[in-house]
Amino acid sequence: MKRQSGPFMTIIFACALVFTALLAPSSAALAQEKTLKLVALGDSLTAGYGLPEAAAFPVVLEKALKAKGYKVEIANAGVSGDTSSGGLDRLDWSIPDGTDGVIVELGANDMLRGLDPAGTRKNIETIVERLKARNIPVMLAGMYASRNLGEAYIQKFDTIYSDIAKKHDLVLYPFFLDGVAGERSLNLPDGLHPTAKGVEIIVERILPTVESFLARLTQR
């Protein structure tokens, strides 16, 4: 067989390098000295409403991070139907001592019930402040208001997460349901909760932001 050379081999070599880079652990993963213990504090979107336990967001996210070389455990502290007030009420027992970081995903039920955004803002900021007082870093996973709630409500609600993240220097993922909201094939028949495939897309999109969060944790 004739030996291949020239441009063909150059292309093969370049492709091999790209593939190797994709599989290689990130610098943050390589810098880890211990297993990071995270908690995902949220509502049904975190809990995995209507899905097998293995398809819930925290489980799928943990699996994706481990595949990239991270040593991490993510506890599922999602409660279906929870509002920001409910998350605040159970904060102390949901986040055990020894937690390295918390991903907060709350507020969707506040919005769906038409609760005053000022109350949602206060509750989420109090959660952040109480975790900071315990020296536990927070990443915010935000939510956007339904477009049928009116401009005044939308303006008040949609700025909650970015304002709090900016004030407290938090890692922010602006919209937890990015790429999934409104897509019938990626949601259960209720149109509100993601399917297993929907959760996979959420994890795929949020993963770089979570990696930024982990980079902060490994630098502490």
Image: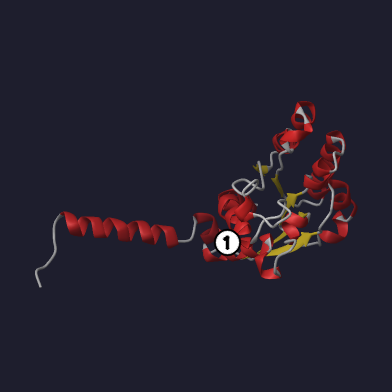
Q: Give amino acid for label 1.
A: Leu
Q: Residue furthest top?
A: 152
Q: Residue furthest left?
A: 2
Secondary structure at numbered mark 1: helix
User: Residue at coordinates 59% horizontally, 64% vertically from top-left?
Assistant: 33
Foreground of the two, 91 or 130: 91
Quadrant in which the N terminus is drawn:
bottom left
User: Residue at coordinates 74% horizontally, 63% vertically from top-left?
Assistant: 50
Q: Is residue 73 above or below residue 46?
A: below
Foreground of the two, 82 or 123: 82
Per the image, the residue denoted by label 1 is 65
Q: Residue furthest right?
A: 89
Task: Determine whether, in the image, residue 187 is placed left or right of residue 41.
Answer: left
| Mark 1 neighbour density, 10 Å: few (under 14) some (14–19) many (20 or more) | many
Residue 2 location (% of width, % of height): 9, 69
Residue 198 location (% of width, % of height): 62, 56
The part of the image, by quadrant, that contains residue 31 is bottom right
Task: Determine whether, in the image, residue 53 is placed left or right of residue 113.
Answer: left
Residue 174 location (% of width, % of height): 66, 41
Could one spot residue 40 in this view of the protein?
no
Tell how many labels. 1
User: Residue at coordinates 57% horizontally, 65% vertically from top-left?
Assistant: 66
Task: Determine whether, in the image, residue 137 is placed left or right of residue 118.
Answer: left
Could one spot residue 64 in this view of the protein?
yes
Task: Determine whether, in the image, residue 197 is placed left or right of residue 4.
Answer: right
Q: Is residue 59 above or below residue 198?
A: below
Residue 143 location (% of width, % of height): 71, 42
Foreground of the two, 86 or 49: 49
The part of the image, by quadrant, that contains residue 41 is bottom right
